[in-house]
Image: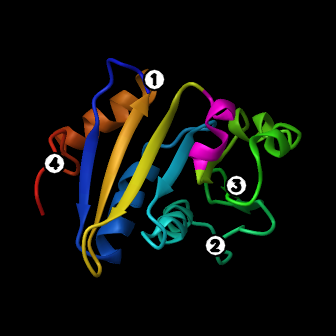
Amino acid sequence: MDAHSTTYWFDSRGEQDTYRLAKELARLFIPGSVIGLDGDLGAGKTTFSKAVGQALEVQETVNSPTFTIIKEYEGRTMPFYHMDVYRISQEEAEDMGLDDYFYGDGVTLVEWASIIRDLIPEEHLSVYIENTGWTERRFRLDPAGAVYEKWCSDLKEQGIIHDERQES
């Protein structure tokens, strides 16, 4: 993470809020957008990924690519590349040609991105989800790069996210 970047927060009271955050982010996506997704077990990484797919108007069912590693979907405006790297090593990932996705014409979302941190493009949006209750989640957004900083700044101005950690 860039030493100059700001950390942003989004508090979700349930799936509906998670889908709202995904929809707001999807409005900002451009080809080559990369989202690194990490979080507590069961925090909702796959739910958030499904929400991104829905926001991109993917017609297929978006589900976890845990054993296939990468699933490709066709969205209305651009492709959606959904990765789950939980079961592979960085060395294995290096041989998979991930740059073709990261620098391609779609949006790439990587679950468990911290496992392949050195392979993720320098400019990306890191999202960490933590459980804060039965249905409540706290999203931490760490933008790396001017494009992602602008996204977060714009979402903050719209009152969607905030840049100070607030208690739920």
Type of amino acid at the residue the image marks with label 2? Val
Determine contact: label 1, label 2, CB under 8 Å.
no
Q: CA distance from mark 3 to mark 2?
A: 16 Å
Q: Nearer the viewer, mark 4 or mark 1?
A: 1
Image quadrant in which the C terminus is located: bottom left
Name the residue: 54% across, 64% down. Answer: 49
Mark 1: secondary structure = loop
**How many residues crowd mark 1 within 10 Å: few (<14), some (14–19), many (20+)?**
some
Q: Nearer the viewer, mark 1 or mark 3?
A: 3
Type of amino acid at the residue the image marks with label 4? Gly
Specify the segment rendered in magenta: 113-121
Residue marked by disc 2:
62
Residue marked by disc 3:
85
**Residue at the limit of the structure toward the bottom, as seen here:** 134
Image quadrant in which the N terminus is located: top left
In the image, is residue 61 above or below residue 154? below
139 part of magenta stretch: no
Residue marked by disc 1:
145
Which of pointers 2 and 4 lies earlier in the amino acid sequence? 2
